[in-house]
Amino acid sequence: MSDALNYLMKVRPGEMKSYFQFVKQAGEHLDPKTRAIISVITKVDNQTETGLRQYLVRAMQVGVTADEIIDAMFLAFPTLGLTKIIWAVDIILGMEIPEFDPESLGKKKTWHDVMAVDDLKNKDVTYVKASDRELFIYTDNDDVKVFDSHCPHQATNIPELVLEDCKLTCPKHGWKFDVRNGECIEKGNRPLHEFESRVVDARLEVSW
């Protein structure tokens, strides 16, 4: 939440509560993906960079694909126009979200070989680069959790050097995460994105 919104929540709590209640109820009959896509297109139309970054990440967390985002922008071409679409794509490319890589568009999720299971650190965090991804992996005996390195706030890539014990801190806005479960434990309110994983022939495979 911006400083301005925090200020308005303090000085006009009643009015702001009504506003947020309206926003929450406005799309209650839409499925999560449709609502998320509309929110993204609204931010593109208003050319609100911070909002686009936040709502794009939220949309992808509920299952909206990069192809669907691009399709939605072109479908809204009559109201957006090419200038706003280019503005949005420039921001999206700057976020370096792997799903928007040209080679990834149009492809279904596949399993990727990441590393040998024996090389994982038990009850500790393992950082690894695999293909176009940077991953944080927490292992507790047979329970393996694999998390994306991008912060769910504005898709900032979180480097390994900010990992302290099992706590990961985004360098941009200070969101803190517990890599044992991916939960946000300070400042933010959304967890790290967790990838589906499996073990095949003593190798860890991850789906994206």
Image (spheres, rainbow, N blue to C red):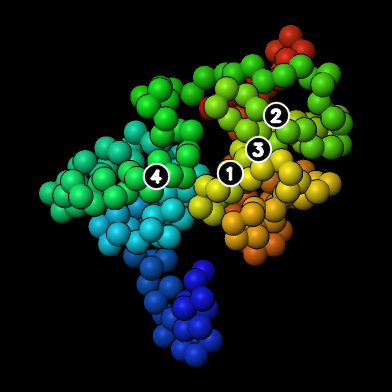
Most extreme residue toward the left, as rendered? 78
Q: Which residue is mark 1?
A: 157
* Nearest to N terminus: mark 2 or mark 4: 4
Q: Residue at x 39, y 44 (%)?
A: 92
What amino acid is at disc 4?
A: Ile
Q: Residues within 10 Å of mark 2 (few under 14, many from 20)?
A: some
Q: Which residue is mark 3?
A: 147
* Contact between labelled residues 3 and 2, with CB atoms less than 8 Å apart: no
* Contact between labelled residues 4 and 2, with CB atoms less than 8 Å apart: no
* Nearest to N terminus: mark 2 or mark 3: 2
Q: Which residue is mark 2?
A: 128
Residue 32 visible from this viewpoint: no
Residues under labels 2 and 3: Cα distance? 11 Å
Q: Which mark is residue 92?
A: 4
* Nearest to N terminus: mark 3 or mark 1: 3
Q: Residue at x 77, y 50 (%)?
A: 167
